[in-house]
Amino acid sequence: MSQEEMAIALDSKRSVLNSYENNVASPPLDMAMRISDFFRISLDTLLRIDLTRMQESKVSELERGLEDYIKGKYLRVIATTVTPDNRENIELVSEKARAGYTAGYSDSKFISELPQFSLPFLDHRKKYRSFQISGDSMLPIQDKTYVTCEYVEDWFSLKDGLCYVILTKEDGIVFKRVYNEIAKSKKLVLVSNNPLYKPYEVNIEEVIEIWKYVMDHSKTLE
């Protein structure tokens, strides 16, 4: 891209851009923000990191905001509901609502129409949601059981072998044991309790939400 083309994209002049590139002048804050938005790289990264020393693949990740998204620093919308005294509800996603949740997870109207309840012994400072699982892949947790989970903001914090509800673009809601390969390959390995189901990998860019298993609610007595 030429200086002229870049200047037009930034709503500026070629001579001004030339002065920045040759260290004659520094861009004011509003221009720095426009540059940040144009390249989709945070101001903090632009100011603190020498991008010329980084591998192209890493710069590409920065441009896509992938690392900040994984850490929960990048905008990741989560719709929620609260009680009259402004405490978080636990929304219940039934088997019938699972398909709708994949499309409506960030829709406040859809979330507000889900059944809601509270559990006073859970930490009111954290966000919880209950999901009805299906199938026998996570025995001894039975088909149709509800699992209550805690919202995970920083995906780098996922602990190997623990159970999580994962919302993905391709498969919707799945409940699996997770092995964290984000740092090495930008993937999660999802494993079932039932050995009849083979483990499989999910690219982290396909993941929308992650919820850590806290407890389940099953009907054990007739």
Image (cartoon, rainbow, N blue to C red):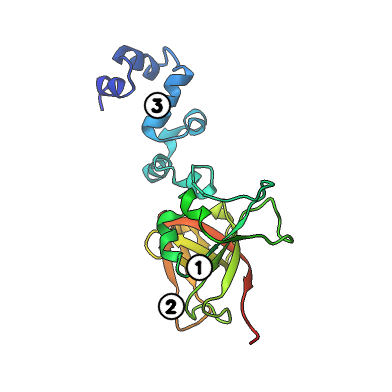
Of the numbered discs 3 and 2, the one sitting upstream in the chain is: 3
Q: Which of these two is toward me, 116 or 204?
A: 116
Q: Looking at the figure, which quarter contains the N terminus?
A: top left
Q: Identify the residue at horizontal 38%, vertical 16% (top origin).
A: 22
Graded by Cα atoms within 10 Å as few (under 14), some (14 to 19) or many (20 or more), the crowding at tag 3 reads some
Secondary structure at badge 1 equals loop
Residue at x 46% of width, y 64% of height: 97
**Residue on which disc 3 sits:** 35
| Residue 94 tag number | 1
Q: Where is residue 163 drawn, in percent x and y?
A: 57, 68
The local secondary structure at tag 2 comes to: loop
Classify 10 Å Cα crowding around label 1: few (below 14), some (14-19), many (20 and above).
some
Mark 2 residue crowding within 10 angstroms, few (<14) / some (14–19) / many (20+): few
> What is the count of numbered marks?
3
Foreground disc of the pair 3, 1: 1
Residue type at mark 3 is Ile
